[in-house]
Amino acid sequence: MKYIKPIEQLIQESEESGEKTLKRSLNAFQLIMLGLGVIIGAGLFSLTGLAAANNAGPAVTLSFVVAAVGCAFAGLCYAEFAAMIPVAGSAYTYSYATLGELVAWIIGWDLVLEFSVGAATVAISWSNYLVKFLAYYQLYIPPQLVHSPFETITLADGQQVHGLFNLPAALVVVLMSFILMRGTKGSAIWNAIVVSLKVAVVLVFIALGWNYVQPQNYQPYIPTNTGVFGEYGWSGILRGAGVVFFVFLGFDIISTAAQETKNPQRNMPIGIIGSLLVCTVLFVLFAHVMTGLSHYTTFKNNAAPVAVAIQQTPYAWLSQLVILAILVGYTSVILVDLMGQSRVFFSMSKDGLLPKVFSEIHPKFRTPWQSNILFCVFVSLFAAFVPIDVVGEMTSIGTLLAFVVVCGGVLVLRKTNPDIPRSFKTPWVPFVPIMGILTCVGMMAFLPLDTWIRLIVWMAIGMVIYYTYGRKNSVIRKKAQEIDTK
């Protein structure tokens, strides 16, 4: 038996009010800003150059368009679910309503891994950028306080010292958790401020750089393929799309805030699709200016391609502004990751699959504050004591897996519950969901082996918890067993 959670029950939960429910305070604009907060991160400032140098050349702009189309397939499916089932939990909740409890657990547990590792990894990287930013002003933090105890640092005089803990990384997690605990509205205001700063820096780069674009840098716009798949030519554009695809990831986190959104049937689709559209336009313009300022070959093996491009203008001070944008951008990514993580656990706890502490609501702030505190401690300790190469790069396998389930869920629900009111309907079904599934499975197939190993180990831990606690305390199971005994 699948133990599927009835759609009617989910809709009823979304309409509950009172001190024990999440506060509905987000509007469409704040949802778009929430999406921009996690999508526009440091990846834009690094992956764009790598995709241009190694794969697509100046046609990296087309790579962004292809990646955006792939995201749009999943985004349209998310929008239908988020408008129809406006409760916290995102893909976890949607899979519970279509594919059953076990699949829902797998997706929920997997999303939490992505949010946790993502928040810790970004916090450690944030600390590294902070050191660079302060060094420009001759301000230095002792190296022992910006590295984990498992790292050895070579000082300027050749002396080697061991790190103690990464203090800035831990502090930024604590700060973002505190903002999150104070309430979603306050978090949204903070997020709107930092997103505005990030977007401003991107727009300044585009506006100032446009006058110094050299048309010869676009020749040829699509470099001739080297004979190797993915190295220039049209295959390079497609491979480049796979690289920059990860810059877009994060729009799905908007759906975790469905239960805190005013008029979610209208605002959730606007937030999801709107953030994707805004980011696509910004990314294409950004990539066009960057490859126009400096020839794409100059970005080879360079993790800071924007700094290379800026050197072709009289505005060298922009490089420091870009680092500031990365710092600001990372804080919003950490904030939204922590929010998504706690909201998924909130839904799993409400369903009885996790202890009740994860769904306890603060009487004043109306947030799952105890869950926020637990994750604050866990993620901050992780960021402080684990080196970034062990934490690993923030990968997308969990998100892509969630995309596949959501796209599949739309197909299933159109068959099993065709008459449920849908204020937003995914267009061109089954074409859009099927293309979403194929795109995401294709992306997953090219992810590195260590990402799959990490996923398998984490899932093994999750299955132990599910069969020892979740299965026994599942609300849906208990109700089904009560019906069977009558």
Image: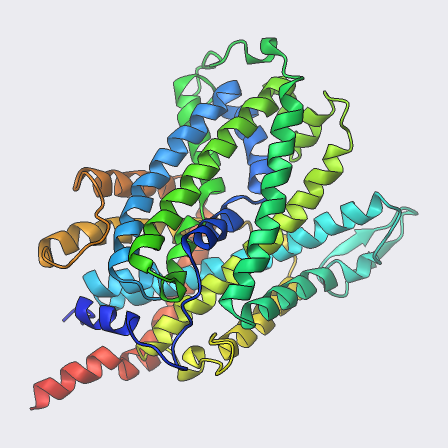
> Does residue 301 show up?
no
For image coordinates 41% across by 53% down, the residue present is 28
Q: Residue 440 in the image: state x and y as whole percent.
A: 33, 42
Please, is residue 24 above or below residue 361 in the view? above
As drawn, which residue projects farthest toward the right? Answer: 157
Task: Pick whichever, 365 or 114, lies toward us.
Answer: 365
For image coordinates 61% across by 51% down, the residue present is 194
As drawn, which residue projects farthest toward the bottom? Answer: 486
Task: Say which quarter of the image contains residue 458.
Answer: bottom left
Q: Is residue 116 left or right of residue 17?
A: right
Screen quadrant of the C terminus:
bottom left
Task: Pick whichever, 176 or 409, lies toward us.
Answer: 176
> Does residue 266 show up?
yes
Please, is residue 473 above or below residue 159 in the view? below
Q: Is residue 423 left or right of residue 146?
A: left
Please, is residue 136 above or below residue 171 in the view? above
Q: Is residue 442 left or right of residue 250?
A: left
For image coordinates 76% across by 27% down, the residue present is 315
Task: Say which quarter of the image contains residue 413.
Answer: bottom left
Q: Residue 325 in the image: state x and y as whole percent.
A: 66, 44
Report the number of discs. 0
Q: Is residue 24 left or right of residue 371?
A: left
Q: Residue 322 in the image: state x and y as whole percent.
A: 68, 39
Q: Residue 236 in the image: state x and y as whole percent.
A: 44, 23
